Amino acid sequence: MLFAVLVGLALVLMLVSLSSGRLPVAATDIWAALVGGASPNVRMVVVEWRLPRVLLALLLGMALGLSGAIFQSLTRNPLGSPDVIGFSTGSYSGALVAMLILGGGPQEMGVGAVIGGLATAMIVYAFAWKNGIQGFRLIIVGIGVSAMLGAFNLWLMRQADLPAALAAAIWGAGTLNGLGQSDVNLVAAVLLALMPLTIALARPMRQLELGDDLAVSTGVSAGVTRLALLLLGVALMATVTAVSGPIAFAALAAPQIARRLAHAPGVPLASSALVGGLMLLAADWLAQHAFASPLPVGTMTVSIGGLYFVGLLLREIRRS
């Protein structure tokens, strides 16, 4: 039931996004444009300009929701998301090195983001290892590594010339501007490749949530499974960073919202993905239309994340 409701909300948000803008488009014209029956101008606005952005918001949000769900399950902590642990910052560092030091373009930045995210994951994993991995230790080490990488990123931008530094800063805020159908195809291909792995690892991940001893007793290799999930979560997050820049807080909030909606003891993967897609669709619509001038979508997700943190603090205060 919840899955169907989330899918319906996603379709409604997609329709609202496709119809909104300086040239409002009616729902009937949107359908005509999608099936090839609209005028060339309407088809250009809907299919060529707005549809790729809407699909990217949905797909990237789903990737963030999945990545956050994996890390929160691994760490057994609602703060265990890739942007808190530092993997997102590491991907940003890799992209900045490719852009500002090596002078690379979008493809090189994408490769740099993936390499940076994986390298950061390996560093955090190595420093957090002590007779196994504990979630809280992984988070603390990740926060420290993230702080160091954040300082490194600022140093890189200070050393760059002004146009390159401005471009890096704008991209670093997380934006869907300038992206098109080729980016949609890339993200869709990555998600299609990673989905079977996610499905295959879903059951072992649930068993790990019960503790390593119980997981091992049921035939799960705890170390190998945890490492595979770590690499999968980093790959999902690095894909987002490579395409749109780092988008904060969606991976943090989406799994917890999905868990509360599903009334589930653990973090549900499918619902987390859909909630992440809904969050990014809503954030991008607000960033484009709620203010006098458009904002990067990452700015809006940070604002939503701040409200989420305030809500968590108020909840903890009431409990205590």
Image (spheres, rainbow, N blue to C red):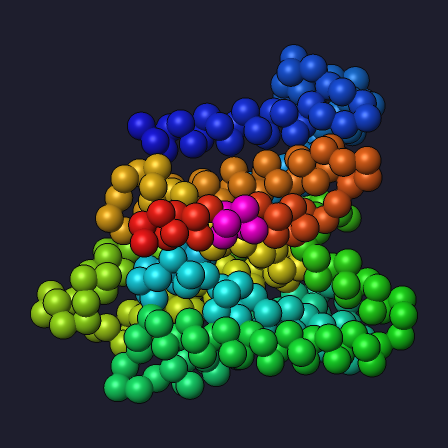
The residue lying at 68 percent from left, 80 percent from top is 152
Which residue reaches farthest left? 217
Q: Nearer the viewer, residue 135 or 94?
A: 135
Task: Using the rendered view, name the quadrant where residue 40 is placed.
Answer: top right
Q: Residue at x 41, y 85 (%)?
A: 126
Count of labels shown?
0
Task: Find residue 96 and report its image quarter.
Answer: bottom right
Q: Is residue 55 left or right of residue 76?
A: right
Residue 27, x across and y down, in percent: 64, 16
- Residue 302 appears in the picture as rendered: yes
The answer to whether any part of residue 250 appears in the image is: no
295 to the left or right of 251: right
Q: Read off the magenta span.
A: 305-310
**Does the magenta-highlighted stretch encompass residue 278?**
no
The spot of residue 242 in percent (x, y) is 63, 62
Q: Compared to 258, does 243 lie above or below?
A: below
The vertical placement of 209 against 296, above or below, is: below
Q: Nearer the viewer, residue 63 or 172?
A: 172
Left or right relative to 70: residue 123: right
Q: Which quadrant is the C terminus positioned in?
A: bottom left
Residue 197 horizontal/vertical position (percent): 36, 58
Residue 270 in the image: above or below residue 47: below
Q: Quadrant of residue 280?
A: top right
The secondary structure that most of the magenta stretch takes on is helix
Q: Quadrant of the N terminus?
A: top left
* 199 relative to 123 in the view: left or right: left
Which residue lies at the image location 73% right of the left edge and 75% below the top edge?
Answer: 154
